[in-house]
């Protein structure tokens, strides 16, 4: 099972985006575990075998600090483009996450 975590502000947009990602995964018959979490909990979630961590566009400024945390755990890390976040586009967000999976 692929584990994807979305880190950012816990908001309506984040909640809807994660739900839309889950729907997109279900439509594709993919076995994924997708959750949202605040960026403050990034180290704890990454230590729990996260395959891909996506950051909300508002957390992009944290990217380089979080790379140092993610790298030792072999967790891929990317920033979701603002357009996909604002549109709550679960398919585009899922595509981005899956692009890091071999």
Image (cartoon, rainbow, N blue to C red):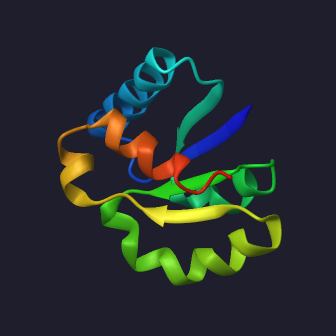
Nearest the camera: 102 or 33?
102
Q: Name the spot of residue 33 as percent of width and height, x first.
A: 64, 30
Nearest the camera: 96 or 80?
96
Q: Residue furthest front?
A: 102
Horizontally, is 71 left or right of 41 in the view?
right
Q: Please report the residue visible at 19 percent of the width from the left and 46 percent of the height from the top.
A: 86
Figure check: 10 above or below 26: below
Quarter of the view holding residue 66:
bottom right
**The N terminus appears in which quarter of the rendering?**
top right
All told, the count of numbered labels is 0
Q: Name the spot of residue 34 as percent of width and height, x first.
A: 57, 33
Q: Please report the residue visible at 28 percent of the width from the left and 33 percent of the height from the top.
A: 12
Horizontally, is 52 left or right of 72 in the view?
left
Q: Please report the residue visible at 58 percent of the width from the left and 45 percent of the height from the top.
A: 5
Q: Please report the residue visible at 56 percent of the width from the left and 17 percent of the height from the top.
A: 29
Nearest the camera: 44 or 96?
96
Nearest the camera: 63 or 37?
63
Quarter of the view holding residue 61:
bottom left
Q: Name the spot of residue 44 as percent of width and height, x first.
A: 74, 55
Figure check: 52 above or below 13: below
Figure check: 98 above or below 21: below
Figure check: 16 above or below 95: above
Q: Name the spot of residue 62 as percent of width and height, x first.
A: 47, 76
């Amino acid at each position: 099972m692929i584990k994807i975590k979305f880190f950012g502000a816990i908001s309506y947009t984040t909640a809807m985006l994660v739900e839309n990602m889950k729907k997109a995964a279900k439509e594709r018959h993919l076995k994924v575990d997708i959750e949202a979490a605040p960026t403050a909990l990034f180290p704890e979630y990454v230590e729990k075998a996260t395959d891909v961590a996506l950051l909300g566009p508002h957390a992009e400024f944290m990217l380089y600090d979080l790379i140092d945390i993610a790298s030792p755990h072999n967790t891929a890390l990317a920033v979701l483009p603002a357009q996909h976040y604002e549109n709550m586009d679960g398919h585009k967000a899922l595509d981005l996450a899956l692009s890091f999976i071999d």
